[in-house]
Amino acid sequence: MSNGQSQPYPNPPSYGYGYGAASSNESAFHVNDLWRVIKNRWPTSVSILAMVMVTGYVVTKLQPKIYESSAVLRVEKENRDLQVFQSSIDGFDPVFFQTEFEMIQSKKVLYPVIQKLDIANRIAKTMEMPEGSLNDDQAFQIFRKSNLEVRPFRNTKLIEIVCTSQKPEEAALFANTIADAYEETRRNEITRRSDSGLKALESEVEKQKKLVSESASKIEKIRKDLKIDELPGSSAQVQSTTLSDMEVQRKESQLSELRADMISRKVRLEKVADLSIEQLESTLPALNLEDSTTASTKQQYLQALQVVAQMQKQGYGKKHPEMEAAIKAVSERRDQLNKLISGVRRALSIDLSVAQAKVESLEKEVSDLREKLRSDRTDRLAPYNEARRDMETQSQLLDVLTSRYRQQAVESKIETRPVQIVNKAEPSVRPIKPSLRLNLILSLVVGLILGISLAFFIEYLDTSIKTMDDVEKYLGISVLAVIPKGAKFLSQDEPSSRFAEGYRILSAKLNLTGSRDIARSITVLSGGPGEGKSTTSFNLAWVCAQSGMKVLVIDADIRRPNMHSALGIENTLGLGEWLAGQASLDELIQSTSVPNMEILTAGSLGPEELGGFSRARFGSLIEICRSNYDVIVVDSPPVLGISDASVICQEVDVTLLLIQHRRYPRNVSMRAKRVIDEVGGKLFGVILNNVNIKTDDNYYYYAGYSTQYGYKRRQPRAKKREESSSPQIVLDDASPPIDPTDNPDESSTGSSDNLPKVTYINSPQDEDRY
């Protein structure tokens, strides 16, 4: 500046906090940016997490408690059914246990339980339905799907019956009742089969006794007809045994065995003929008639049933495509199994026919041999010997049947326990559902995911200025100072406040302490209200006054003045009266409690009374005050929507754009800069205000370091020593001011000779930190 005329400031160099405009290839997203978003948005994430956790807790507490009880059974295989001429075979049969596994869940076992415990009405009450609204079949379907689960222990004979209910005693009652019903069903089935087999065997014994009696009567008649006094086989027998007799005896022995086998097959076929497909299916292993094909098909059928049951528990409907396919597979396997089982009946019938044919063939052969013997013998004992041999054959067969009948009769009287209850169900103390711990863990995971996702979504929607790079990228100017969050009027704080350092750095950047003939006028503008213009203007004037400069503060915000409140003075006369020409400056400028600081308040006249902000009167005010003050700080209204700020920025030397961190969309700041440029304002740089350095690591280096380094609370005993070692910034008055003719691009990248000379007292090793 020269000849008393104000000269514009050049564009500021990119030193201090700025790094120049960010290029397009420097916009890469780093992991640190993710952490920054989380730190800045942690209240949102924590709120969502707390809400989800509370919701999970409340929902868990409101859900009905489900208790589980289980009874463990040991299932034994019973092989006595129809085993008239075969020995029992015991061993682990996976098909048998899979069959019993399904039998426990069948209607045959569960229907008596449902009727005994009135489960239909219990379920209706739980579902808040009127009593009697469910029949037994509906109750069976609901109970099997929701309240019953059968778990086999792999490679053991143990089966676990698990029941659930909202009452622990009820769950235990269900499990124990089902276990008892299954045990009773198995015992009754075995008893019925045993009694039926004994009756059939007893009938055959009676028939054989009649045959033996008829043979004895025949022998007695022949003996009387032939007038034989002694029985054959005694020493009086007149004819010795020939080879032909021995052959006849051997054939007759074979005939007896074949007849016994035929009777066994006949009994088996008669019994099997009375069984249904399902009964015959469970009987095949005991009869040793189940071949590998039948066993494999049966296993496939049971597996298909398991698939359908599992899909029903998972909630698949009958019309679901996968459920229809599974049901179709069950039907196909059932049809295959029924055909194979029906084939067993036919095979037994063919077996019996073959056995009968063998018996008839051997009978004919024996008859032929006997006829040949009779033709060869001429003695009168031949008919008698033949009759006796026939009786012996019938007697041997009777002995075999009688022995087997007695054995079965004894076995039937022995108490059998095909099912043993290993562990009875007991009422559970703790519910299995809902699990508070599991739900809270899930809520924690969901809450974290939702909270962090919402934080990033809000960050994505947030178009405000967040970083210094944003300022340089979207506005193309540098950040001069970063003011931490919570700054207030310095006159109400300690002189060594950590907030004062930011304004001191701003003053140093503006080179306000250099020697000059006239004052520099500065105004602080913002795009919107409430961004901290008045506080920043006052604090900048305060630090200048503290450094020994004579400062005039002009409150040009005639719509919302507040400078007088900060200093505790009246606002009866001020700038409004000057613009209206109603008073002189000597009457309007007031002294303050801050040394070297005077103020021109806004005055009592509003914009309606003034009729507009006079640029000529305001310009003359600035020119008059230049010779009496070192620095003139003008507090102005927002630049958007109010014309006063446009007038002010044209008349002052330096315009500073104040942007509150994360408040307004960046379009507001961009429009504010555009307005300043359009009216010819000398925009020097940006002040980033109200930055939370605790959550944003990007600003910790710039604004947080001074807190740790020079503004810690001092202990009384070490006060003097710490004062002598605290860093002080002294601006050399002899340092040359910034030349308005300098090229701004060269000043940002070239020599630093034009910058204010800064001397660091007691901290030369930390010079690069400023």
Image: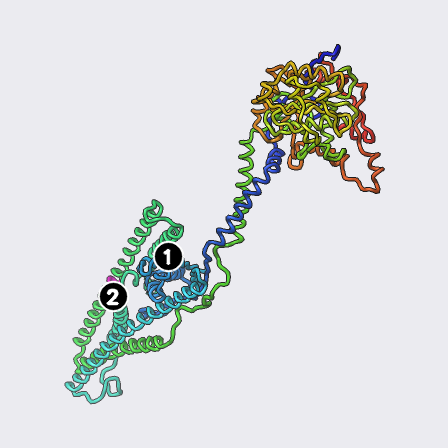
Picture layout, residue 616 above or below residue 718 = above
Picture layout, residue 418 above or below residue 637 = below
Q: Residue 274 — which label?
A: 2
Q: Nearer the viewer, residue 560 or 481?
A: 560
Instruction: Decide if residue 296 is on the left or right side of residue 481.
Output: left
Instruction: Quadrant for residue 364, please give it.
Output: bottom left
Main secondary structure of the magenta stretch = helix
Q: Residue 411 — which label?
A: none
Residue 311 locus on image (x, y percent):
38, 50
How many dots with numbers?
Answer: 2
Circle 2 SS class: loop
The residue type indicated by label 1 comes to Glu
From mark 1 to mark 2, how far is it between C-alphas?
46 Å
Image quadrant containing the C terminus: top right
Q: Residue at x 68, y 17 (%)?
A: 652
Instruction: Decide if residue 516 is on the left or right side of residue 145.
Output: right
Instruction: Quadrant for residue 756, please give it.
Output: top right
Q: Residue 128 — which label?
A: 1
Instruction: Decide if residue 162 is on the left or right side of residue 556.
Output: left
Question: Is the image coloured rainbow, by chain, by secondary structure, or in one colour?
Answer: rainbow
Instruction: Quadrant for residue 418, please give it.
Output: bottom left
Residue 414 locus on image (x, y percent):
37, 76
Tell me which segment is drawn in magenta.
348-354
Circle 1 SS class: loop
Residue 436 locus on image (x, y percent):
52, 54
Q: Earlier in the sequence, mark 1 or mark 2?
A: 1
Q: Nearer the viewer, residue 484 or 322?
A: 484
The crowding category of the residue bearing disc 2, from other C-alpha atoms within 10 Å (few below 14, some 14 to 19, many at least 20), is: few
Is 88 part of what is drawn in magenta?
no
